[in-house]
Each structure stands twice: as structure tokens, then as C-alpha cells.
Image (cartoon, rainbow, N blue to C red):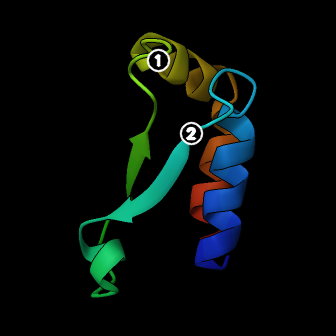
């Protein structure tokens, strides 16, 4: 899966609870220095002034975990 497709898919999963979410790669993915044993680091930025999303983002990803895991596995 292309990098932009993964970001788009994760963004779509989070959009209902965080419409202004900004998702970026982090670590080796951001540096495009990826090896076979590299994980996928995602940096999820939200507007702290509007809401505290920590639990909501975790819940959204865990409730849609199959789709999220599928997106990561196909990356």
C-alpha cells in the first residue's frame, strides 16, 4: 500500500471523532529509512483546545481494529 493511501485510510477511520486530525509518519517511516524489521510509526495531531481525543482515538481504532490492521498489513 502506498504511504498516502495508508494516511488517507487512517484519517478516514478517525474523521468522525476528529475531523481536523493531522496524521503523519514518524521515525524511520518519516525518514524513509525503512528496513524489513521496521515498525510503522504514526504521529496523530489533534487540536487540544477543542477536545481531548486520547481515549476516543483509541476507542475508534480498537472498534475498527480489523480495518486498521488490514491497512497496516497491506502497507
Q: Is residue 37 visible?
A: no
**Residue name at image x 69 percent, y 32 percent:** 19
**Residue name at image x 42 percent, y 41 percent:** 45
Q: Nearer the viewer, residue 6 or 53?
A: 53
Q: Quadrant of residue 63?
A: top right
Q: Is residue 64 visible?
A: yes
- Above or below residue 45? Residue 6 is below
Left or right: residue 58 versus residue 8 is left
**Residue name at image x 56 percent, y 39 percent:** 21
- Which element is circle 1 on? loop
- Indicate the position of residue 15 as horizontal and vertical percent values: 71, 34
Q: Nearer the viewer, residue 9 or 48?
A: 48
Quadrant, the N terminus: bottom right
- What residue sits right under mark 1 in the picture? 53
- Above or below residue 71? Residue 59 is above
- What residue sits right under mark 2 in the picture? 21
- What's the CA distance linking mark 2 and mark 1? 10 Å
Q: Earlier in the sequence, mark 2 or mark 1?
A: 2
- Which element is circle 2 on? loop
Mark 1 neighbour density, 10 Å: few (under 14) some (14–19) many (20 or more):
some
Quadrant, the C terminus: bottom right
- Indicate the position of residue 68 as horizontal and vertical percent values: 64, 43
Mark 2 neighbour density, 10 Å: few (under 14) some (14–19) many (20 or more):
some
Tell me whether the residue at label 2 lies in contact with that at label 1, contact meaning CB atoms closer than 8 angstroms. Answer: yes
Q: Which mark is residue 15?
A: none
Left or right: residue 57 versus residue 17 is left
- Above or below residue 19? Residue 28 is below
Amino acid at each position: 500500500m502506498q504511504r498516502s493511501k495508508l494516511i488517507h485510510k487512517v484519517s478516514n477511520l478517525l474523521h468522525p471523532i476528529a475531523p481536523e486530525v493531522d496524521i503523519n509518519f514518524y521515525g524511520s517511516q518519516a525518514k524513509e529509512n525503512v528496513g524489513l524489521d521496521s515498525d510503522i510509526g504514526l504521529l496523530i495531531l489533534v487540536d487540544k483546545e477543542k477536545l481531548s481525543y486520547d481515549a476516543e482515538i483509541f476507542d475508534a481504532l480498537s472498534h475498527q481494529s480489523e480495518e486498521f490492521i488490514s491497512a497496516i498489513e497491506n502497507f
